[in-house]
Amino acid sequence: MKTTMLSLLTALLLCSQSFAKDRATPAADFSGVTSTGEKIKLSAFRGKVVVLDFWASWCGPCRKEFPFLIKLYKEINKGEAQNLEIIAINLDEHSDNMQKFLANLKTDVPFPIVPDPKGDLPKTFKVEGMPTTVFIDKQGNVRFRHVGFTEKDRSKYVKQLNTLLHEN
């Protein structure tokens, strides 16, 4: 029993050290032009929680995650508090594939989409699979990273975003 408890405490300590280490990882700043022609810069969103979502039209899990992100964005940002920003980074080589994907959603996307057909940003953010979703805290630090998306991820996203949104 003592060995099991010691192992559990050691695991918790390692997890908390890992979390603290991840917490101090500054997100690389970048500039981009959205699909509507607006220039944006990641550092301009300092003070908000930012979600970077790397996606493509051909990605099956992206088809499930993207509508969920739209719903999550609308729920968190209802009312006067606009504390969450999502930047969707599209990796399709041809913009018409992105446009077809968005048209099939049958809803407006309330957050900016930055096309990156050359794939420059995935290198910067070490994207290993699709979708890759990066949660950045109000101070501009990468705190959580997700590769892929399943139904089980929904509650994890909500919990982690609530943690970041309620921090100073």
Image (spheres, rainbow, N blue to C red):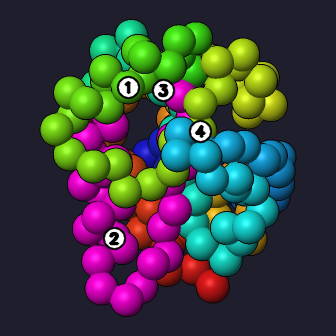
Task: Identify residue type, mark 4.
Answer: Val
Nearest to the observer: residue 37 or residue 130: 37
Asked which secondary structure carries label 4, the reply is strand
Q: Quadrant of the C terminus?
A: bottom right
Question: Which residue shows up at 64% across the image and 18% down it?
Answer: 117
Question: Which residue shows up at 31% across the image and 31% down it?
Answer: 102
Q: Position of residue 92 (x, y in %)?
A: 53, 16
Q: Is residue 106 visible?
A: yes
The residue that disc 4 covers is 114
The residue that disc 2 covers is 76
Which of marks 2 and 4 precedes in the sequence?
2
Q: Which residues are magenta?
A: 65-90
Which of marks 4 and 3 precedes in the sequence?
3
Mark 2 in CB contact with mark 3 (< 8 angstroms): no
**Dot in front, 4 or 1:** 1
**Label 2, label 3: how many angstroms apart (C-alpha)?**
21 Å
- For label 1, the crowd category at 10 Å Cα-Cα, with few meaning under 14, some 14 to 19 and many 20 or more, is few
Which of marks 1 and 4 precedes in the sequence?
1
**Label 3, label 1: how many angstroms apart (C-alpha)?**
13 Å
The residue that disc 1 covers is 99
**Label 4, label 2: how many angstroms apart (C-alpha)?**
21 Å
**Dot in front, 2 or 1:** 1
**Dot in front, 4 or 2:** 4
**Label 3, label 4: how many angstroms apart (C-alpha)?**
10 Å
30 relative to 107 in the view: left or right: right
**Dot in front, 3 or 4:** 4
